[in-house]
Structures are given as C-alpha cells and as structure tokens.
Amino acid sequence: MNASVFLETRRHVGPIDSRMFGGFLEHIGRAVYGGVYDPGNSLSDTSGFRKDVIEALRRMRMPVVRYPGGNFVSNYDWRDGIGPKERRPARPDFAWKTIEPNTFGVDEFVAWCQKLGTSPMMVVNLGTGTAKDAAELVEYCNLPRGTYWSDRRVANGVKAPYAIKLWGLGNEMDGPWQAGHVPPEVYAQRAAQAAQLMKGLDPTIELVLAGSSSCLMPTYMAWDRVLLEYCWDHVEYIAAHRYSGNPASDTPRFLAEGVEVDRILEDYASLIGYVRALKKSNKKVYLAFDEWNVWYRERHRDYTWWQGAPPLLEEIYNLEDALVVAQFLNSFIRHADVVKVACLAQIVNVIAPVVTRPDGLLIQSIYYPFVLYSEHATGIALVPMIDSPTYRAGDRGDVPVLDGAASFNPEQSAIGVFLVNRSLEHDLKVDVTLCDRSIKRVKDVKVLSGDDPKAANWWDDRDMVKLVRGKAKLQDDGRVQVHVPAPGLAVFDLELSK
C-alpha cells in the first residue's frame, strides 16, 4: 500500500513549544510513594528519590511536570506538606480514598524536579481552597524573603525562591466527582480572584484555567466559554483533558483516535477565536492539554479504602496504545499554534510509561513514542500534505491509513518526520517529498511495530514492544521512501543540504 507526504519549510503553523512534552505527577496510588519517592530503598538517593526512575524519565526530556493533581489537589492543603516531616499530619484523601502521609510535598517535589532537570507546573486548590491559600503558595514559592511564607521556606532550608512560572487554577472543576465542584460562573469567579492575588505577588507567572474534563461532558464548550469570557484578561491558557480507550476491543476504530484529538483541538481553537473577537482583544490565549493518555482498563478497580499508597490504576500498555499516544503527539504538533503545553498523565506507576517495583523498573510501550517525539520534534511545526488510502474505522467512518506530522529545525537544517500506519494488514510504502529544499540524507530511522497490536511489555517479557531500526532510502529524484509496518510508527530525521 502506498502513500505520499509533501512538505515545505515555508508552510508551517509556527514554533513548537517544548512544554508540549510535559508530564504529570499526582498523589495517587504508587505514583509518588514507591514511585518517584522511596526512602530506604537501595535504588534511592539520600533524598529518597528513585535514581532509576529519574534516569528513565530524563530520557523523556520533559520540560515541565504538573503537580500535585489532578483530583487530589481539590482537597489538598499544601501547608501539610512543608516543614519537619515528623510534624506533618496524615490526612484522608477525598479523591482516591487513601491516606496521604504528606512526607512528600512542595519542597520535595521542586527538589526532585531539579534533579530530573525539569520545571514545576504547580496546581492550586480551587475546590476547597481559597484565593488567599493560592496566593500564599505563590508567596512561599516565588518571593525572595521578608514575608511570613517566604521566610518559612527559608526556615525550611531553601534560601532562593523557586521562581515557578506556570500555575494551574484548580483541576476539572466541571466534574461532579471533584471536591468543591461548582457551576462555571462560580468557578470563574474563584479563578479570577485567585489570579488577581497570585499575579499581584508575582506578575511574571502564567496561569491555566481548568477547562472541560472531557469532550463527553454535557457542559463541554459551554463551560469553557463562560470561563474564557470572565477570565480572559487574567489567564494565558485554558486546559483540556482526554483519556482514550478501547473497551470494545475494536482496534481499527481505536487506531483512528487521532481524528478525535484533532476535533477537540479545532473546537478550542474556534472557541478561543470567538472569545477573542467578542472581547475585541489583541491578547492570545492558548491551550494547555495538561492531562492526556490511554486509560480504560483500570478505571473501576475495587480496592480497600484508607490505605497508604496502594497500587491504583496501574494500566498495562500494549502496541496499539503506543500508536494512539503517537497520534496525540502528531495532533499536538499539527496544532502547535494552539497547543503550547501538554502533560502526559501520568509518568510513574499510575497510567504511566514507567512502572516500578522495589528491585527495579519496567519500560512500557507508550514510553517509546514519547521519547522519539520529544527528541526529534523541535523548531517549527510544518503542515504535512498527505495523500493516503483510507479504511473503515467503525462509526468514525473512512479515515486515512496514514497519520503524520513533521517539524523543521532551521538551526540544525533538519526535518523530523513522524508517521503512523493505522492499518492492521498492509504495510505502507510512504514517499516523502520536500518541495522547497534538497535532502542530503536520511538518518536515525526508528520503528515501533509488531505482529500483535495487543503485545505488551511486562516483568516476565520486557521486550515485546521495543524500538528497532527502520528502512528509508533517498531516491535519485530527491524523494525519501520509507517503510512503515502494519500497524506501526516510523520516526526519522532528514538532513538538508545547505
């Protein structure tokens, strides 16, 4: 089966923000305790941070990690997690019905971020918390010293302010499951009040509104419109969330998931443009897709309540899941003029690319596309013109077999190409043509594929899904021909002639 991709370096949608490849760490299950933080384990450093986890996550090149939630944040008092650990109170967690010991809090998270080489995205509690609580967290984190909470940070051993740039104004406040859930008008008022106080202390910070938790919510877009109209002058981003799944085991339909992601991004682009026109504003507000992943198998697992860090939502990922993750990233790149921040939810143990046990860790299938994209998608996002056969994807109709994205790094004179073959039966022979430049050579061709879309890595067989060297050739007429297996992902760089 044949397909074609046409690229032009002058045809693009603008720069790719590296924060598109962010992550998310929440106090849930074994994400923190037994995940990133495991004091006393021989694999942990003197701070209690798992060194093997840091090493694995470092390869993901995440510029930002969102914390501490998620649903957890809406009943969380950040003050419980600072100061001497022996004095920190254990609290019941409303969201996940577990016990939170608070031995890992703001200071530990920022110290962990520094070791990983990433920046914090701090989310404030606007469910049960107040605007004053949120502002005091900014004071603790970002003011130098000389005030009550900044001096508390200094007394806790951190002299220099953390200078956290990106802040989330609560989480999924449209959801009835959320502690402190309110109608959009009430949340908008809370968010605007918090924004004014927070920016009053540090005008340099950027703020993210908690938009719709899902496009399936009955208030989808209506919720977001109310927030944007009320808070437009106070924020820089609005958040979107999506978790994809294949509960009916309909793989052809599932592999067309990128179509739905595109639609959500286009919905937000339209809404943001509408509110901007309504406001007659020169300001731009962007999208922070700060929760996204495949998640459906472990949603309704029974467990004993009021434990400390039980194993929750530990999804086992397979090849088809990895190809859907790749399609999320393709869509983000194609809409880089709208999407500036995105956070894979989550990063360790809980619906995560990395799974731990006391004696080591496991790399899941979804790890590989994330690593490839964060390495190769730099510079500006090109607009790929794709000529592809289609296939029937259930109620999603006829969908192109080939899903693709591309980036151009002018400084390196290189193009990154990202191709997903959605077919279960037919390999793709894809011709890539660069219309305005000459290609010098093809390099670093990596392929993720396999005979079984349900194949997954686990402790007894860790290499069922892995990256292998791919096949691509520069033709005499200047085209590049690449082989993309069925189903599979191919990622490679094109080095351009000067």
Image (spheres, grey):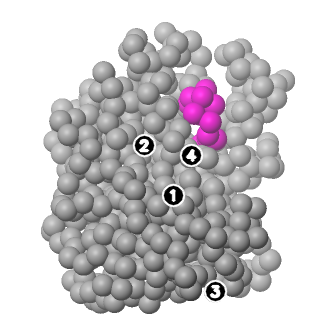
Q: Quadrant of the N terminus?
A: bottom left
Do callouts 4 and 3 mark residues in contact (Cβ within 8 Å)? Answer: no
The answer to which quarter of the image holds residue 231 is bottom right
**Would you say residue 215 sits in the magenta stretch?**
no
Viewer-nearest of discs 3 and 2: 3
Quick check: 465 above or below 355? Answer: below
Residue under the point 66% across and 55% down: 207
Judged from the image, the secondary structure of the residue bearing numbered disc 3 is: loop
In the image, 143 versus 54, the foreground residue is 54
Q: Is residue 116 magenta?
A: yes
In the image, which disc is placed on residue 444? Answer: 1
| Amino acid tagged 2 | Ile
Question: Which mark is in front, 2 or 4?
Answer: 4
Report which residue position mark 4 lands on. Answer: 61
Whole-Å distance between the Cαs marked 4 and 3? 31 Å
Tell me if residue 464 can be seen. Answer: yes
* Of the pair 44 and 482, the residue shown nearer to us: 482
Q: Amino acid at mark 3?
A: Cys
40 relative to 117, above or below = above
> Element under label 2?
loop
Q: Secondary structure at mark 4?
A: loop
Q: Which residue is mark 3?
A: 435
Q: Nearer the viewer, mark 2 or mark 1?
A: 1
Q: Which residue is mark 2?
A: 347
The residue sitting at the right extreme is: 146
